[in-house]
């Protein structure tokens, strides 16, 4: 059955064998709640894997300029033959391209690689606060949205101060904040901040990026009860707490396995048990200090 989340942000349709829930964004658009991510997948491999994901039924594809595989993703989209309005494509601004004019140029490059006329969602990949450019980048995002070239605009890895600044300077609130979230880093505070602004939380590294999460004994017990895999249980947890989630795999069987996660319905007891494994363990960068790709502002 459907479910509503805090602040009325999430609107979910009933899940069938072929239906993925959709989440309402604050600008009136909708995003599939379960998608496919291509982080660190080489361009040619990303083309093959994205094609397989589209064949299985994924309609949200998440890439980034930094991943170096926008062209491969674009080739897979073009070859799929799927109607454009059935797809939801996200890419992200690379850190070295921050700044107003640089952002506009970078957007054109990404669109050329993707082979698209209009983008569904554009994200600032990291705030890189010491560079002091993310607010100018956001102003460029607002201009892109006003031009109609981007349907929705959001951010990634933003903390409260970063969100407050861009909202205060432009009056425009991101529709989505993509942050590291998994059962070992449940991000209750940051998810609450997002919700208070009617910003959807999207989880990157949703399965813990190979750091042992899928071997957790608590999660394994829950999976056994549901006759599901641990990955399916973790993805079901994301869906039931209201996150948009973009698991990555290049293995066809796992791409298909992950797509079945909405069929797993966790109980209140399951959810309470998953809460107990939260250790606050972050595997990616800290948004307050990370400046990936910007050596003049390297972490200290």
Image (cartoon, grey):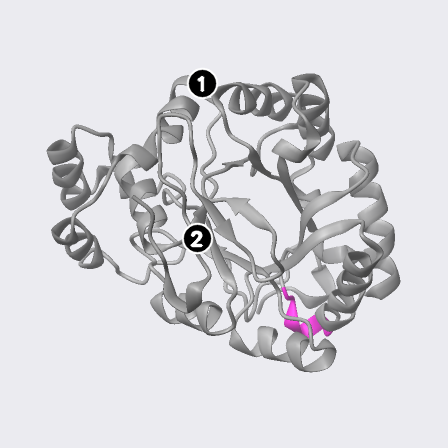
Residue 292 placement (x, y as % from top left):
64, 56
130 magenta-colored: yes
Kindly tell me whether residue 212 is visible in this rendering: no
On the image, the x and y values in percent for residue 140 come to 81, 63
Q: Is residue 48 magenta?
A: no
**Residue 65 image point, x, y percent:** 71, 44
Q: Residue 248 in the image: state x and y as whole percent.
A: 47, 34
The magenta segment: 127-132
Reading the image, the residue beneath label 2 is 11
- In front of the other: label 1 or label 2? 2
Given contact means CB atoms under 8 Å apart, are the residues at marks 1 and 2 in contact? no
| Residue 54 visible in the current orientation | yes
The residue sitting at 11% across, 35% down in the picture is: 225
Q: Quadrant of the N terminus?
A: top left
Q: What element does badge 2 sit on?
A: loop
Q: Specify whether 164 is left or right of 202.
A: right
Q: Please report the residue visible at 73 percent of the width from the left and 44 percent of the height from the top.
A: 119
Q: From the viewer's perspective, tell me whether residue 3 is left or right of residue 136.
A: left
Mark nearer the N terminus (1 vs 2): 2
**Quarter-wise, where is residue 127 in the image?**
bottom right
Asked whether 254 or 263 is in front, the reply is: 263
Whole-angstrom CA distance, mark 1 to mark 2, is 29 Å
Picture quadrant where residue 21 is located: top left
Q: Is residue 257 above or below residue 293?
A: above
52 is higher (above) or lower (below) than 220? above
Q: Which residue is mark 1?
A: 252
Foreground pick, 20 / 217: 20
User: Tag 1: Cα neighbours inside 10 Å, few (<14), some, or many (≥20)?
Assistant: few
Under tag 1, what secondary structure?
A: helix
Residue drawn at x 65%, y 72% is 129
Residue 78 in the figure: left or right of residue 252: right
Residue 48 against residue 1 in the figure, above or below: above
């Amino acid at each position: 059955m459907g479910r509503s989340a805090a602040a009325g942000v999430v609107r979910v349709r009933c899940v069938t064998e072929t239906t993925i829930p959709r989440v309402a964004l604050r600008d009136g658009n909708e995003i599939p709640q379960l998608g496919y991510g291509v982080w660190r997948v080489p361009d040619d491999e990303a083309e093959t894997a994205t094609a397989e994901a589209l064949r299985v039924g994924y309609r949200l594809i998440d890439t980034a300029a930094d991943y170096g595989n926008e062209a491969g993703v674009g080739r897979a989209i073009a070859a799929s033959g799927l109607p454009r309005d059935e797809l939801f494509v996200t890419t992200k601004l690379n850190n070295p391209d921050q700044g107003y004019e640089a952002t506009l140029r970078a957007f054109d490059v990404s669109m050329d690689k993707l082979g698209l006329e209009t983008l569904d969602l554009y994200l600032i990949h990291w705030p890189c606060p010491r560079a002091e450019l993310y607010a100018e980048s956001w102003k460029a995002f607002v201009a892109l949205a006003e031009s109609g070239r981007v349907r929705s605009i959001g951010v990634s890895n933003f903390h409260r101060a970063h969100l407050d600044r861009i909202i205060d300077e432009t009056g425009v609130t991101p529709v989505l904040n993509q942050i590291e979230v998994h059962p070992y880093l449940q991000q209750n505070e940051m998810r609450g901040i997002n919700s208070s602004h009617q910003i959807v939380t999207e989880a990157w590294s949703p399965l813990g990026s190979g750091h042992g999460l899928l071997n957790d004994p608590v999660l394994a017990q829950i999976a056994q009860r549901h006759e599901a895999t641990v990955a399916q249980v973790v993805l079901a947890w994301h869906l039931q707490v209201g996150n948009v989630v973009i698991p990555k795999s290049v293995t066809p069987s796992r791409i298909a396995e992950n797509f079945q996660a909405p069929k797993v319905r966790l109980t209140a007891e399951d959810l309470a048990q998953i809460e107990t494994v939260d250790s606050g363990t972050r595997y990616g960068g800290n948004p307050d200090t990370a400046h990936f790709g910007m050596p003049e502002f390297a972490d200290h």
